[in-house]
Image (cartoon, helix red, strand yellow):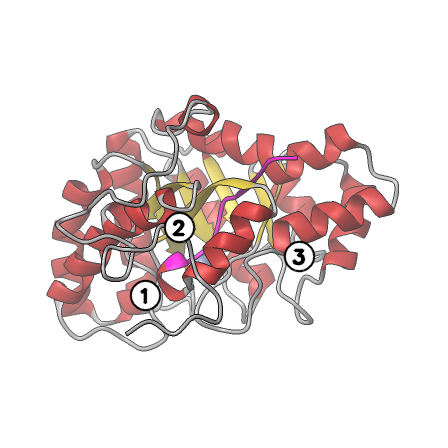
Amino acid sequence: MQFIDPHVHMVSRTTDDYEAMSAAGIVALIEPAFWLGQPRTAVGSFRDYFSTLVGWERFRSSQFGIRHYCTIGLNSKEANNEPLAEAVMDLLPLFASKEGVVAIGEIGYDDQTEAEDKYFRQQIDLAKELDLPILIHTPHRDKKNGTYRSMDVLEEHGCDPTKVIIDHCNEETAQEVLDRGYWTAFTIYPGTKMGNERMVDLMKHYGPERIIVDSSADWGISDPLSVPKTAALMFQRGISEADVRKVTYQNALTAYSQSGQMREEHWLDAPEIDRSQLFSGNSVLRNGRKTERTDNVVEN
Ligand SMILES: [Zn+2]
């Protein structure tokens, strides 16, 4: 079975993760622009990060047979540094128009401050201007209000809910998000928040329409195999293959292909992996010699 992980921060992950994801059936992934665990202090850090998302990381992923897409945006946490946020806003149109960018995101609220609200609204307008889908990060604190407020603002701006993915939903917010017509995404964190047993219960309750499962794996404790593992548990609990496919593959593809940047042929007709390929003169190989990973071999 093939899977898409539509929310995973690969710049924080290793080549072992890429190998395990590929072996588990992940054929495509989406890497949303987010914060890096500590605040950036200069606009150049954002420029280089965005450039990595559309450049080196996209290449690195291809070297493990996984098609890489990304979203571009100013995250809500760093929107609170207003002088920096202004400079980042100027960068966004350039990067959002690059190949492989499937949405503006992840944007929304963190502490629900005035500055967050300001840059959230500006980025909604940018998405509309570029005719791109929007990926919403809902806050971990005061989630219900933050989620409802995000949808209120999107509706105030006349956004089509079928072009918006609301992520980090839970049992408290899912019904309202579905009722208002949005793609409703769930992040499966190991041991905390949305465990995968809870996801199975949600699937049994809501069915597969407009539901999306992702790992949101990053620099924290997280699992880049959350999507295939949740699928396996769904099968064990008697959910049909067609329904599992919708929430772990098809719905994400339908939602993000509205960008015009993501198509199934990209991985179905992918060329053979060639690890001698270079990106800006660099490859994933060491010393340009080995084409496969060698375990337990010390190289000089
Ligand atoms: Zn994220």
Which mark lies nearer to you, 3 or 2? 2
Q: Residue type at mark 2?
A: Glu
Mark number for residue 31? 2
Q: Residues within 10 Å of mark 3 (few under 14, many from 20)?
A: many
In the image, residue 230 lies in the stretch drawn in magenta: no
Q: Secondary structure at mark 1?
A: helix
Q: CA distance from mark 2 to mark 1?
A: 27 Å
Circle 1 is placed at which residue position? 114
Q: Quadrant of ligand 1?
A: bottom left
Q: Earlier in the sequence, mark 2 or mark 1?
A: 2
Mark number for residue 170? 3
Q: Secondary structure at mark 2?
A: strand
Disc 3, ligand 1: is the CB inside 8 Å?
A: no
Give, as a single range, the part of the protein colored magenta: 1-10
- Residue displayed at 54% across by 68% down: 140
- Residue displayed at 34% across by 45% down: 71
Q: Is residue 180 visible?
A: no
The relative height of residue 92 versus residue 252 in the rendered view (above or below) is below
Q: Secondary structure at mark 3?
A: loop
